[in-house]
Image (cartoon, coloured by chain):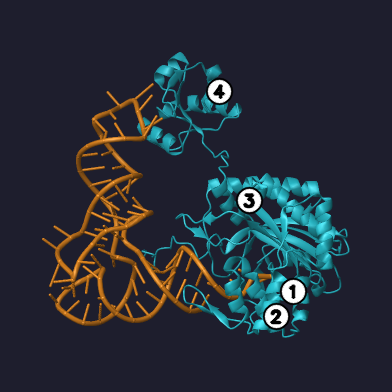
Amino acid sequence: MTKENNSKPSKELPLGFVDRQEKELLVRDFIISNIKEIMIKYGFKYLETPSFEFSDSIGKFLPDKERPDKGVFSFKDENKWLSLRYDLTAPLARYVAKNYLEIPKPFKRYQLGTVWRNEKPGPGRYREFLQFDADFVGTNNLRADAELCIMISEILERSGLSKSEYIIKISSRKVTENLFKKINLNDSKQKLTILRALDKLDRLGWESVKQLLGDGRKDKSGDYTEGAKLGSQNIEIIETELKKKSPETEDLLEVLNIFNDYKFTNYEFDPSVIRGLEYYTGVIFEVNLKFDVKNDKGKTIQFGSIGGGGRYDNLVKSFGNFDAPATGISIGLDRLVYALMQKKDFNLKESKPVIICVFDKNLIKEYINLQKIIRNAGISTEIYPGEGKLKKQMEYANKIKSPAVILYGEDEIKSGTPIIRDLVSGIEKSVEIKELASEIKKII
RNA sequence: GCAGCAGUAGCUCAGUUGGUUAGAGCACUAGUUUGUGGAACUAGGGGUCGGUGGUUCGAAUCCACCCUGCUGUACCA
């Protein structure tokens, strides 16, 4: 791939990292501005925490305790290990534990920030991405969980999705706990395997999931996954239980009541929603898109959910002295943007300045004057920033999709009437300087 | 991690029984137009054919290993 000699720096990017261009960034900014507005409306505080944390601050919650560093980027500073954060929830728990006595209880905060994961990237998934989190800390009230779902719907709809294009799937850790009781299962390793299998239901379907609950499954590339080794009777019990269309656990019944009070309907109970396997303790939810997402070659890809969350009542406690139940939601903003851009033409304003052409360097004062007049009128403009002939300047204007060019050579300066060339129609118009700005506005 | 497919110019790709200085379209540069973009025409630059090693008189082409990318799968706190 790299054609450089070893002596030259590589122009390639590390695996899973990407450059992002204006078009995408503008859509992202648009969504962020919606989020901020809605967060203020819902009464959340804005917080920022650093990109790095001590590794054990985020690592002590790793489910795989034998390899605490797997999946994160870390380095050793003096004698301490630091890691780039892999989510915004662990830093929040750390922040709450650190500032517990000062903050209001319950504490509602939202955060926007880049997170990093040292794992294999997939379609629409990178190793560096922007996340949005909103959490309630210090309350058991299930209205918090319900309101998170309602709030995220408002964000999605404000950003351009209709009700038919997304759904909030909701379940509870308690659903699967009851299930394990029913089949008399205590082996925690086996439980984990079962949860992981069920989590794949919407992607793989019942046939494959039953294989994963039993002996194992071979995927279409030929790779084999070991199963949970359940007997067929237990598998059937699981299937019947999970095909139930309405929830039976108390927490979910209450959340559904609250949804009803809010007249919120764009959700569905789905017991196959599992999510982050270890620290969730109660209600869990997932935000799913209901349309196909394609990659840049036009192929439909397995996109998965764009976010989710749930109740994690023991996370803050694990830091030490303070016990605070909590619930929160995370959205992968870059993924949301990626999907949204396929659905909708946002037509947001890119930078497309009117170009003032330079006929002669000695006339630069004249051009600065025009530039000042046009910019003061609130119009994006620039004096051609390079060097070269008029043709080259026109090509530049065309390339950056400039709406118009200002021609002001010796003749025009003599008469004090610059020419505006409309780059879409090609029509040129000679105008008085005092009408310059208003004439440009007619075109753009 | 495992598996399938792929890697030839900036981009999209052509290039089979291995044979001279490796091609096209688009893009780029200059000109046809000493002050006019998007079209056309002319000319030009750009590649140790992902890398290393091997087989051979001779390798983009065959073999081995490695690297990178895409897709699926595992993991995803």
Residue to which mark 3 is pinned = A165
Nearest to the eye among marks 4 and 2: give it: 2
The local crowd at label 3, few if under 14, some if 14 to 19, many if 20 or more residues have their Cα within 10 Å, is some
List the residue tagged with mark 4: A437
Chain designation of label 3: A
Q: Would you name the residue on which mark 2 appears?
A: A191
Disc on the earlier residue, 3 or 1: 3
Separation of residues labelled 4 and 2 (CA atoms): 70 Å
Q: Colour of chain B?
A: orange
**Residues at marks 3 and 2, common chain?**
yes
Q: Residue at x 83, y 65 (%)?
A: A251
Q: Tell me which corner region of the image, top left, top right, bottom left or bottom right, holds residue A181.
A: bottom right
Judge by depth and name the residue closer to the eye, A46 or A287.
A287
Front-most of residues B50 and A366: B50
**Residue type, mark 2 in image:** Lys
Left/right placement of residue A316 relative to residue A356 reads right
Q: In whole angstroms, how far apart are the C-alphas of marks 3 and 2?
A: 33 Å
Q: Position of residue A293 (x, y in %)?
A: 54, 55
Q: CA distance from mark 3 to mark 1?
A: 28 Å
